[in-house]
Image: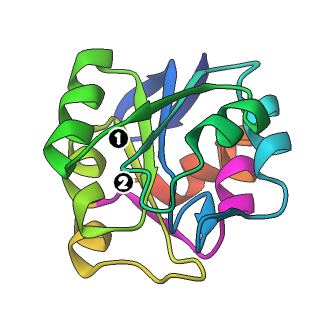
């Protein structure tokens, strides 16, 4: 679990992390540098899951490389449903328009403006915005930095 204090608001008790794949953890179907290691480290604190429509295929190879559950989905509604199933302690991370519903529903929604950019609807739905996936891993490893940003 990761606890995030939020002065002026109830603390967040994060238990699960849900990630979009393409545009967030990968660009053009290729994992970004540091992703397997970042997910491994995060998996020591949270249950980690990657949701993907498998636009570029390669799910079997991906399952061998990533130390977490990988679930094939079709739509943003599928992503939303998965976050809702996991309950109140979810951090969701994405960049696309189909990620906006899960970002809004999560206890903490983080948008990554990476190599594939980010949809305006995802930006509007998120609590935090970062410029690469490494920042997500760093923030979750250092929750006081999240506190500083989310302070009311």
As rendered, which of 94 and 29 lies closer to the eye?
Answer: 29
State which region is magenta. 126-137
Residue 81: quarter of image: top left
The dot on residue 152 is 2
Residue 90: quarter of image: top left
As rendered, which of 27 and 80 lies closer to the eye?
Answer: 27
Q: Give how far across and how far down residue 133 sits, in percent.
A: 66, 61
Q: Give how far across and how far down residue 1 sits, in percent.
A: 60, 16
Magenta stretch contains residue 136: yes
N-terminal of the two: label 2 or label 1? 1
Residue 108: quarter of image: top left
| Secondary structure of the residue carrying numbered label 1 | loop
Whether 127 is drawn above or below 85: the answer is below
Residue found at x 52% / y 59%: 149
Whether 102 is drawn above or below 135: the answer is above
Residue corresponding to mark 1: 8
Residue found at x 43% / y 30%: 71
| Secondary structure of the residue carrying numbered label 2 | loop
Q: Quadrant of the C terminus?
A: bottom left
Magenta stretch contains residue 111: no
User: How many numbered markers are drawn?
Assistant: 2
Residue found at x 36% / y 57%: 127
Residue found at x 61% / y 21%: 46
As rendered, which of 74 and 143 lies closer to the eye?
Answer: 74
Picture colour scheme? rainbow
Crowdedness of circle 2 by 10 Å Cα count: few (<14), some, many (20+)? Answer: few
| Left or right of residue 130, residue 99 in this image | left
Q: Give how far across and how far down residue 150 sits, in percent.
A: 45, 54
Crowdedness of circle 1 by 10 Å Cα count: few (<14), some, many (20+)? Answer: few
Q: Are marks 2 and 1 in contact (CB under 8 Å)?
A: yes
């Amino acid at each position: 679990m990761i606890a995030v204090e939020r002065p002026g608001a109830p603390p967040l008790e994060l238990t699960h992390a849900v990630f979009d794949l393409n545009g967030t953890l990968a660009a053009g179907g290729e994992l970004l540098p540091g992703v397997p290691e970042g997910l491994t480290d995060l998996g020591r604190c949270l249950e980690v899951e990657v949701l993907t429509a498998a636009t570029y295929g390669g799910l079997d190879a991906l399952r061998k490389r990533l130390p977490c559950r990988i679930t094939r989905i079709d739509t943003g509604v599928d992503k939303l449903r998965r976050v809702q199933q996991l309950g109140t302690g979810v951090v969701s991370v994405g960049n696309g328009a189909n990620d906006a519903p899960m970002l809004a529903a999560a206890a903490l929604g983080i948008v990554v403006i990476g190599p594939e950019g980010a949809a305006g609807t995802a930006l509007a739905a998120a609590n935090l915005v970062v410029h690469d996936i490494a920042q997500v891993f760093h923030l979750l490893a250092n929750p006081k930095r999240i506190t500083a940003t989310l302070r009311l």
